[in-house]
Image (spheres, rainbow, N blue to C red):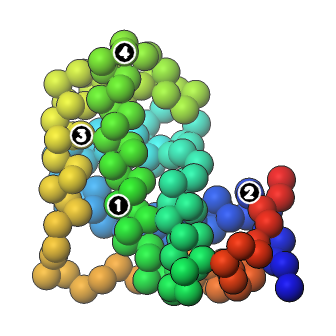
Amino acid sequence: MTGEVSAERLLRAAGEACEGQLRSWVDRLGGSAGQVAAYQFGWSGEGPGQGGKFVRAALTLACAGAVGGDRRRAVPAAAAVEVVHNLSLLYDDVLDGDTVRRHREAAWRVFGPSAAARSADRKPCSLGRSRRPPVPVPGTAELRALPPQPAGSTTVTR
């Protein structure tokens, strides 16, 4: 039995599943680092609020499912992959002098290169263990609605 899932649906489900965890980590950053991170994820500022496609998160969740794991339990790992990807984009934009990211002004152009770099430096620190209870995973209905993923049998369509 082959399950078919549109790429758009898979990416949207991954983004919805990870957003709560991402927001929790960004909230922990606080200050200007948190402001830069919120802007980078598309949650604040001028222009389109597009925080990315969540391709890496979707791949992380798909890999968990492909090996028989529970995709919901893989959400923190998927969110962590998105954090690392986004911090690399902050550095990349500063180093390359890119002025636009995701159809709006790059974070370093809004907050300055030093603030962008400091935010990128602090993001991995927000991933550390916390005494707070785990973040409830919104979007789990979407994850459950995706067909089971026996190894090698899922086709992703446009």
Relative depth, front residue between 12 and 95: 95
- Residue type, label 2: Glu
Q: Which mark is residue 8?
A: 2
* Viewer-closest of 112 and 117: 117
Residue at point 54% right, 80% down?
Answer: 67
Q: Secondary structure at mark 3?
A: helix
What residue is at 74 percent from the left and 58 percent from the top?
Answer: 7
Q: Are marks 3 and 4 in contact (CB under 8 Å)?
A: no
Label located before the other in sequence (1 or 4): 1
Q: Tell me if 86 is positioned left or right of 155 in this view.
A: left
Residue located beneath label 3 in the image: 120
Residue 54, disc: none
Earlier-in-chain disc, 2 versus 3: 2
Q: Which residue is mark 4?
A: 96
Element under label 1?
helix
Closest to the camera, between mark 3 and mark 4, is 4
